[in-house]
Image (cartoon, rainbow, N blue to C red):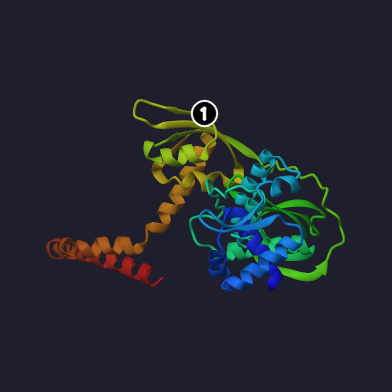
């Protein structure tokens, strides 16, 4: 406990420059006498720490201490701090711990000028849990198993040796050796379900493996698209291509997209997009829209229409005589049959 406090005192003084004994006593919840004993101990191990009385006094470490002990240039220190500020968003253990300690040792202020959050806007606790489980399995070299949903709508059980977590585009991927395929594979974290970590460790050394980060999609299709101007925020966010605009501010773009992902992506824009080419994609979208439309054309809709017009049917029955009654019973019988079936 004492050793931990001594290091914390050291980091605190390095980060803040000149401090007072009462300030340290308040922060670490010990007496001023204990602080002075701690300062004596720090001095005894060769760290140039000293105290000064009066105005402008306090406890301070020699300004040249850190520089003389460091082999890193100022630029290298800055790069490390930037990298750690990014990494700490993927692991809460870094927060106010490693970053603040290194910023103190480097005598650099931890300027929070950048914040990276790799999660989506929804609070997805299961996704976060999967991330940390995989991270632990990689560090401990443990085999993991899970259910995986691929692009062909197939669900398979995988047993893999996890190697690395990779953030690519807008998604997290796991790079691993898959025992089922007997080869290296990328797995998208959002498609992993029922993940379990086994107690079996693997001996393979993947530390020097070179990963080809070009995640090649399956067959792609070249599309010419026209977007409504209201979709501009998504178009500029998601499409990395030349975007043209007409006099009505509609947007035009040409993209190559995975065949398996195509329909899902296009339909996500609702009526805010039109596929101009190729014709076969236009035809396929029409077929899907017709299928969707048929799902909403239920007999409930037809029956509601008939009941809404009951007065007109009544008029047919009473004015149309025998033929009117036959029409009425035919309509009623059809409606009743379909309602019960």
Of all residues shown, which one is farthest toward the left?
A: 319
Q: In the image shown, does 313 or 291 lie closer to the viewer?
A: 291
Identity of the residue drawn at 63% across and 38% down:
220
> 333 left or right of 142?
left
Kindly identify which residue carries mark 1. Answer: 242
Q: Quadrant of residue 18?
A: bottom right
Count of marks placed on residues: 1
**Above-or-below relation of 262 to 223:** below
Q: In the image shown, does 50 or 289 lie closer to the viewer?
A: 50
Quadrant location, the C terminus: bottom left
Identity of the residue drawn at 48% across and 56% down:
121
Please state the horizontal and vertical placement of residue 48, each as a whole percent of the image. 71, 54
Please state the horizontal and vertical placement of residue 302, each as a whole percent of the image. 31, 60
Identity of the residue drawn at 60% across and 61% down:
92
Please state the horizontal and vertical placement of residue 11, each as a whole percent of the image. 64, 58
Q: Is residue 159 visible?
A: no
Quadrant location, the N terminus: bottom right
Q: In the image shown, does 180 or 108 lie closer to the viewer?
A: 108
> 113 left or right of 33?
left
| Pointer 1 local density, CA inside 10 Å: few below 14, some 14–19, many at least 20 | few
Identity of the residue drawn at 70% across and 49% down:
65
């Amino acid at each position: 406990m004492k050793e931990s406090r001594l290091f914390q005192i050291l980091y605190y003084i390095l980060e803040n420059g000149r401090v007072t004994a009462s300030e340290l006593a308040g922060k670490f919840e010990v007496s001023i006498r204990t602080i002075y004993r701690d300062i004596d101990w720090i001095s005894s191990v060769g760290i140039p720490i000293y105290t000064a009385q009066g105005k402008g006094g306090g406890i301070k470490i020699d300004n040249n201490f850190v520089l003389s002990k460091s082999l890193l240039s100022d630029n290298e220190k800055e790069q490390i701090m930037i990298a750690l500020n990014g990494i700490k968003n993927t692991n809460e253990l870094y927060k106010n711990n490693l970053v603040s300690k290194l910023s103190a040792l480097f005598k650099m202020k931890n300027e929070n000028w950048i914040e990276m959050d790799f999660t989506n806007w929804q609070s997805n606790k299961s996704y976060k849990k999967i991330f940390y489980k995989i991270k632990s399995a990689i560090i401990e070299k443990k085999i993991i198993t899970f259910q995986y949903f691929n692009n062909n709508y197939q669900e398979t059980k995988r047993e893999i040796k996890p190697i690395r977590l990779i953030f690519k585009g807008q998604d997290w991927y796991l790079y691993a050796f898959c025992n089922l395929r007997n080869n290296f594979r990328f797995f998208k974290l959002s498609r992993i379900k029922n993940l379990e970590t086994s107690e079996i460790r693997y001996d393979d050394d993947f530390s020097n493996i070179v990963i080809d980060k070009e995640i090649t999609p399956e067959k792609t299709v070249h599309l010419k698209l026209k977007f409504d101007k209201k979709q501009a925020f998504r178009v500029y966010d998601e499409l990395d291509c030349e975007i043209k605009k007409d006099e009505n501010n509609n947007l035009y773009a040409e993209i190559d997209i995975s065949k398996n992902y195509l329909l899902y992506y296009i339909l996500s824009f609702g009526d805010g997009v039109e596929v101009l080419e190729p014709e076969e994609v236009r035809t396929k979208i029409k077929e899907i829209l017709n299928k969707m439309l048929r799902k909403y054309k239920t007999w409930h809709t037809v029956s509601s229409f008939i009941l809404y017009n009951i007065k007109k049917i009544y008029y047919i029955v009473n004015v149309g005589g025998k033929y009117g009654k036959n029409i009425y019973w035919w309509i009623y019988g059809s409606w009743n049959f379909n309602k019960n079936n």
